[in-house]
Amino acid sequence: MKLTLVYVLLSPTFGMHQYTANLASHAMTLGHTVHVVTTALAPRDRYATGVHLHMPVAHVTTGFAREGASPEGMVRVWRQMMALRPDVVHFTGVHLWNPLLLALLRIRGVATVHTLHDLDPHPDVRHGVLIRLWNRLVIYSAGQLLVHAERYRQRLARQRSAAQVHIWPLTHTFLSATAEAELMTTSPRRTWEPWVLFFGRVERYKGIDVLMRAAQQQSGILPSVVVAGRSRDALFTPPGVIHLNHHIDDQLGWELFCRCRAVVLPYIGATQSALPAAAYAFGKPVIVSDSGALAESVTPGRTGWVTPAGDPTALATTLAEVRRCTPATLAALGDAGRTWRQAARLAEQQQLGDMYAAAVGG
């Protein structure tokens, strides 16, 4: 069954566009016609050729701000969606308008899917109470729900039919469509320099303070940690830590992943991340905390390490273990991760098709 799919992502959040572009590519591979209704600030290069982008608004937030009060903008989005005559509308990111748009689509008889990324808002996020209410409205309104962690599937299954809740792990990377295609068809040249990589926007909930305290316990290693991503606040960096406090483009990101010893996610308030899959794509092992569902993507001793969230001493011990590993050991861990990701991507494409078929059938 070939469908017309419309993805809706009304914020410019970079990671959400990476996520949406990944789903859109899978859907095109399955033969569906794919549209994305989004903001004019969307990163176009993330999307593969053949994905049709429509930009009826120019949003700069997730709608939990002044622009979310604009009825004119929501009307433009609604008209754009209806003009595309969708079989399924899939909301892939947070926006204040989503629950109302879901209700209107339900009245029209259009099948809907909504991804829920954070059932528990990050501890330092603004509008946390409003987001919890928003989550409840989405859970009630969407025809099908998609999550990327087993623990969240179990929670949702207590509120919705198990057949309406779908799950698979996150598998996308941080790359553009062109660079992603190159990565899928080549084997990056790996080296094993003595530092681990923290990649992405620097936020407190990601455990950056824990990582810095753990790095302080590393002696004689220069560098021991590379932090690659912007920080809004001044970051204390002990000896051995390098902070690249700027936008990391695809070329530099590719180089950093190829050179690091492992990728570290010391998060203290996260629910999930696609970075383990990105590390595996480059054949690198990962160190994650047991925050949220991060550990669901890691097999300790096979694809990486799991440490207690908020424990710098335990993290320092793991960093020392990673430093002692031979390149052959690290390569074996990275190879196992790459095998995991390849299998997960194949399963993701199949499950995506099954979910849309269930949405239309329902």
Image (cartoon, rainbow, N blue to C red):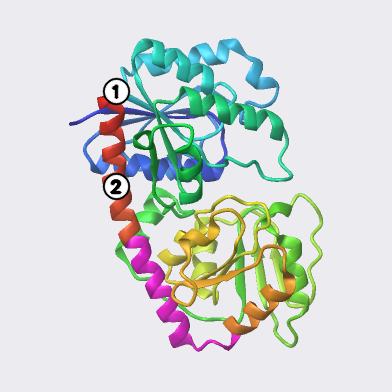
Residue at x 73%, y 71% (from the top left corner): 312
Q: Which residues are magenta?
A: 323-342
In the image, taking residue 105 as reference, residue 75 lies left or right, namely right
Residue 133: x %, y % from top left: 63, 27
Which disc, if any, is residue 219?
Answer: none
Q: Dot 2 corresponds to which residue?
A: 349
Q: Dot 1 corresponds to which residue?
A: 87
Q: Is residue 61 visible?
A: no
Q: Please state which amino acid type lies under the numbered disc 2.
A: Gln
Residue 262: x %, y % from top left: 54, 73
- Does 85 appear above or below 204? above
Magenta segment, prevailing SS (helix, strand or loop): helix
Estimate how packed mark 2 is, as few (under 14), some (14 to 19) or many (20 or more) residues with alpha carbons within 10 Å.
Answer: some
Residue projecting furthest to the front: 158
In the image, taking residue 4 as reference, residue 164 lies left or right, namely right
- Does 193 appear above or below 299? below
Q: Please state which amino acid type lies under the numbered disc 1.
A: Asp
Residue 25: x %, y % from top left: 33, 43
Q: Is residue 124 visible?
A: yes
Residue at x 65%, y 16% (from the top left corner): 69
In reply to whether residue 297 is colored magenta, the answer given is no
